[in-house]
Structure formats: structure tokens, C-alpha cells
Image (tube, rainbow, N blue to C red):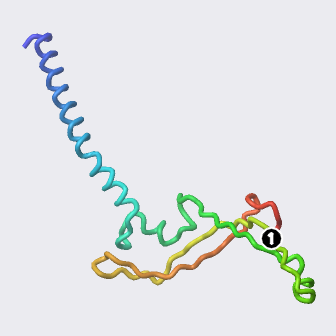
Amino acid sequence: CTPKCCGGIYLIVTGVICLSLCLVLYFEKDNFITWSVNSAVIVDSPDSPGYDAWVDGCSGDLPYVYTSFWFYNLTNYHDVLYDQALPNFEKVGPYTYLECQVKFDIEFFDDNNKVRFSTNYTYFWEQSKNTRSE
């Protein structure tokens, strides 16, 4: 085989392989994406890849969950009580806290299709996201 002939055969074989890979990827990309997301997100046993992050939402590389609260202060309570005045409210907030969820008493059942658990919520004051003090 001459170098020119072998080069042509090499290009044809490489082209066929690349075309085959492109076709497989084109038709299987949705299945691959679904499988990738499901394996990272679905927790169906303690052996699942995302189990530890799901149990302890306060650790790892998960995004933080912030919870904000607003309150309404009654500013004329004396007038409402004694003079039958209409109440005046002042909206204050937001008071923003970092929310931490830790799951415990975890029980998988129904062939790992269902899970039962309790959750402990802990809130941490996040001064950088608040304009008022706690």
C-alpha cells in the first residue's frame, strides 16, 4: 500500500468512525442526559450518589437555601384597644436566614420506591443579607 493510498483509507475509516459516533450521540443524547440527571438527583437507597448531600443539606457543594421573613408591627395598639381605632401596621423585614435541613429516621420501603423521614430545620442569621439587626 502506498502512503497516498493508506492515507486515503485512513481518512475514510476515520470519517466513518466519526460519523458513527455522531449518529449514536445524536440519537442517544436524551437518554444519556436523563440517566446522568437521574443518577445524580434520585435518591432511592443509602448507596445512591446523592444520598449524603440529600441527608445533610448543610454540607457539601449544594447551593445555599435562604429563607426570608417579613413581619407586621401594630403601631397603634393603644388606640385599637381603648379608642376602637382601625389598626395601623408597619411592614418590617426582610429578615433573612440560611436554612439548613438535616434528615433523620430515614426508612426506604416499597422496593426503594418510597422513603419516609423526619427533617430538622435550623436557621442561621445571615447579617450580610439583612439591613436590620436580629
Residue 49, by quadrant, is: bottom left
Residue 120, by quadrant, is: bottom right
* Residue at position x 79%, y 68% in the image: 91
Q: Quadrant of the C terminus?
A: bottom right
Closest to the observer, 12 or 42: 42
Q: Which amino acid does label 1 sit on?
A: Glu
Q: Mark 1 sits on what residue?
A: 134
* Residue at position x 38%, y 69% in the image: 43
**Left or right position of 106 against 77:** left
Residue 90, by quadrant, is: bottom right
* Residue at position x 33%, y 50% in the image: 33
- How busy is the neighbourhood of tag 1: few (under 14 within 10 Å), some, or many (20 plus)? few
**Left or right position of 61 against 6:** right
**Residue 42 placement (x, y as % from top left):** 37, 65
Outermost residue to the bottom: 82
Outermost residue to the left: 1
**Residue 102 placement (x, y as % from top left):** 54, 75
Closest to the observer, 74 or 107: 74
Closest to the observer, 92 or 79: 79
Total marks drawn?
A: 1
Element type where label 1 sits in the image: loop
**Residue 118 placement (x, y as % from top left):** 50, 82
Where is 77 relative to 61, above or below? below
**Residue 32 placement (x, y as % from top left):** 29, 50
Q: In which quarter of the image is the N terminus?
A: top left
* Residue at position x 14%, y 11% in the image: 3
**Left or right position of 134 against 43:** right
